[in-house]
């Protein structure tokens, strides 16, 4: 099985999540992107505890496209310090993995 990666971020508006998802897929940096429903996040920011509504975005990509995808997310992300997490998938459907690799070729 070709290995794939899941890159995850959160943003403060559904419209921003949709743009990040569409831009990554259109640029072949991700085979697909899923925008998750609203979640409430609690965190420390500038010495104060805050809670805010956020939308998650999960991108499925090939390992050789991760750096470019992370760079694009960072450049377009509205947060000063965006959460961008990369997870390597240990196993899964080999047909899906092959599809991810095919769709992330420029």
Image (tube, helix red, strand yellow):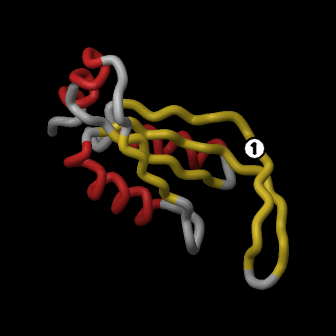
Q: Is residue 82 above or below residue 95?
A: below
The residue sitting at 45% across, 34% down in the picture is 33
Q: Read off the residue under disc 1.
A: 39
Task: Give the residue furthest to the front.
Answer: 90
The residue sitting at 26% across, 15% down in the picture is 95
Task: Give the residue furthest to the bottom.
Answer: 47
- Residue 106 image-quadrant placement: top left
Q: Is residue 34 above or below residue 76?
A: above
Between 4 and 50, the residue placed more toward the observer is 4
The residue sitting at 58% across, 49% down in the picture is 16
- Residue 103 image-quadrant placement: top left
From the viewer's perspective, is 52 left or right of 75? right
Where does residue 56 sit, x and y in percent of width and height? 61, 44
Where does residue 100 sit, x and y in percent of width and height? 28, 28
Q: Is residue 75 above or below residue 11?
A: below
Where does residue 32 sit, x and y in percent of width and height? 39, 31
Kind of element beneath mark 1: strand
Between 32 and 3, the residue placed more toward the observer is 3
């Amino acid at each position: 099985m070709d290995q794939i990666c899941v890159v995850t971020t959160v943003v403060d508006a559904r419209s921003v999540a949709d743009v990040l998802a569409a831009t990554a897929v259109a640029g072949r940096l991700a085979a697909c992107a899923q925008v998750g429903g609203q979640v409430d996040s609690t965190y420390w920011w500038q010495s104060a505890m805050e809670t805010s509504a956020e939308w998650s975005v999960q991108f499925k990509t090939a390992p050789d496209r991760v750096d470019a995808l992370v760079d694009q997310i960072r450049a377009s992300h509205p947060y000063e310090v965006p959460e961008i997490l990369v997870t390597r998938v240990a196993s899964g459907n080999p047909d899906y993995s092959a599809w991810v690799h095919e769709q992330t070729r420029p």
